[in-house]
Image: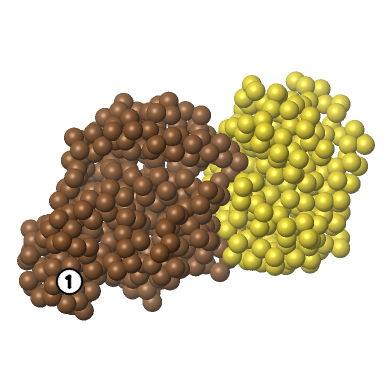
Amino acid sequence: MGKERIENAFLEKQSANENLFVPYIMAGDGGLEILEKRIEFLKKCGAAAIELGIPFSDPVADGPTIQEAGIRALENGTTLTAVLEKLNSFQEKRTVPIILMTYLNPIYVYGVEKFASDCREAGVDGIIIPDLPMEEEAFIAESLKAHSIAFIRLAAMTSPIERLVELANRTEGFLYAVAVTGTTGARTVHEENVKAYLQLLKENSSVPVLAGFGVSSVQQAQDLGTYCDGVIVGSKIVELFYNGKTEEVKSLIKGSISNEYILG
Amino acid sequence: MTTYTMPNETGRYGNFGGRFVPELLMPAVIELEKAYEEAINDPKFIEELNYYLKQYVGRETPLYYAEGISKKIGGPDIFLKREDLNHTGAHKINNTIGQALLTRRMGKKKIVAETGAGQHGVATATVCALLGLECVVFMGEEDIRRQKLNVFRMELLGAEVCSVSQGSGTLKDAVNEALRYWVSHVNDTHYILGSVVGPHPFPKIVRDLQAVIGKETKQQIVEQTGELPDAVVACVGGGSNAMGMFYPFIEDKDVKLFGVEAGGAGLETNKHAATLSSGNIGVLHGTLTHLLQDNHGQIEEAFSISAGLDYPGVGPEHSHLHDSNRVTYTSITDDEALEAFQFLSKSEGIIPALESAHAVAYALKLAKEMKQGETLVICLSGRGDKDVEQVKSLLEGK
């Protein structure tokens, strides 16, 4: 459970000589009833873990694709409570780690301690909170620790080296390296200094480093995979599912994790 | 008596405030905090700020004894702090001029801002024109439709106005989009937030820059009456004019302070913007404060006749002053504000902004409970020219 499950799942993939791939999906986009099926599908495609977004009315770190998915999910009546209940209902059958991505306010209103405890109950393995910097995290870090849930920190390219080192030290499960100066969403190129940034994080992190934000193709995943352990892909996956292109989801994941992929 | 020293070094006002922003923005808010502390301790910066406040903004603004309404009510002597007489017609420019000077000092060349009705956007576009800064303003598409003239004003001043269609297309969504823009352009861009909201150090910077309102008022009322006022009233949306007015009076415990929120169609209807009167605590736009939200932490839309009060959050320092009972927060409905709008126009020849009309409406109620010989100050935060068309159609529709 928790931290260990993420670490073991990642080790297993890496032992099989695969790059790590964590797809992001928005909980409730398409209805909560499809969640179990979608998670199983992603697992079969080769996902190392699933990042599951909780919709929020004011998602300042997200670009248009995920914003719109969030609006659809909220219109479906999706709540944090309902997502945790749904996850709880099929946790016995699940064989892939679940990482919740949620803005702070839904947790705050839910109650921090109850949130950590209910996550544990529901078989949630890790948490990502994009609007919670190190300076403010103490009140929630303790509860997550008490329930052995991995608290995954986000690093940014604007952060000075001391902060990056501190984030690498604190993170649990893996380190989420935001690889653009911007919000989530597809981009064609990444900034040139990404390489040095990812290498610095790799040198300072005892857990895998995954690059995310703006990754939308096998090519980008392979390029970034040269400097870190893998990628997180959100907007592109959300868009493909929304348009019913599940075969493309499969080829994106399979192409990204393969170490035999021939770069075009 | 203990000295009031909020915020602490982590940007907290009691339990409220802080900085809940993505890691991407942390270096920028830390840099801003440092740059601001250096600036306000630099006599040259203060001299420059004071120069522009006097020669460009037109400060100091009068504290006007409103004899007409004082006589009509027959209670306390009522004074109006005339922030409506500032350049661009409201208190907003006290903040934008200071932050624009700070931007120049930080060596940044671009400004991003949000605006609701357009007042903060116009005040930002104005100082950017003055100082030669590039300016991008995010405004909800619903607000753009309602405030066409202010959009044109901003464009005339050289700003680019970007329409925000996400969410409800109003102020809260404009803040989201301005934050997203800042995340993507943080290396060369400063975000001029328009109220005492957002992550630390914004609530402190905006309060300090607006505190000129309260400082002048304190001096002027003593000059005119020989003593401090008995009561001070200001309207609260995000709460910048109120915070600027209240701050210099916080330690003067005999001065009663009243913050007036927008009651919209009434607090019982859910169509209002009375965050402190009926919201609960949460995190929005980088700060821990009172919010209008549902049981699952989703932010709800605010409603008010006045676009400037139409925000589902409130400055964290107001939340603190509310919890510590130093300030009394109350609300005024759309109808009451509309009535006060007309009453002040007819009684004093001053057309107030609809925002300020909320403060006037509550002050008139309060005055009826006060005695002759007492004094009451109303912060008249802006002029009503921008609202005349809207009021006309509202009155004709009745």
Residue at (42% x, 58% y) in the render: B3
| In-image side of B371 versus A143 (left or right) | left
How many numbered marks have been drawn onto this rendered protein structure?
Answer: 1
Q: Nearer the viewer, residue B266 or B37?
A: B37
x then y, percent, for residue A114: 70, 67
Residue in the picture at 25% in, 67% down: B231
| Residue B316 % position (x, y) | 45, 57
* Depth order, front residue of A252/A200: A200
Place of residue B205 in the rendered image (x, y in percent of width and height, measured from the top left): 40, 45
Instruction: Tell whether A101 sits left or right of A230.
Output: left
**Chain drawn yellow, letter?**
A
Name the residue type under label 1: Glu
User: In the current view of this chain or complex, which residue is farthest to the bottom?
Assistant: B369
Q: List the single residue furthest toward the right.
A: A15
Of B140 and A69, the residue lying toward us: B140
Q: Tell me how the rendering is colored.
A: by chain
Residue B232, picture quadrant: bottom left
What chain is tagged by disc 1?
B
Q: Does B254 appear above or below A213?
A: below
The colour assigned to chain B within the rendered structure: brown
Do we see residue B90 in this rendering?
yes
The structure residue drawn at horizontal position 36% and vertical position 47%, both measured from the top left corner, is B208
One can see residue A59 in this view: no
Q: Quadrant of the N terminus of chain B?
A: bottom left
Q: Is residue B48 above or below residue B294?
A: above
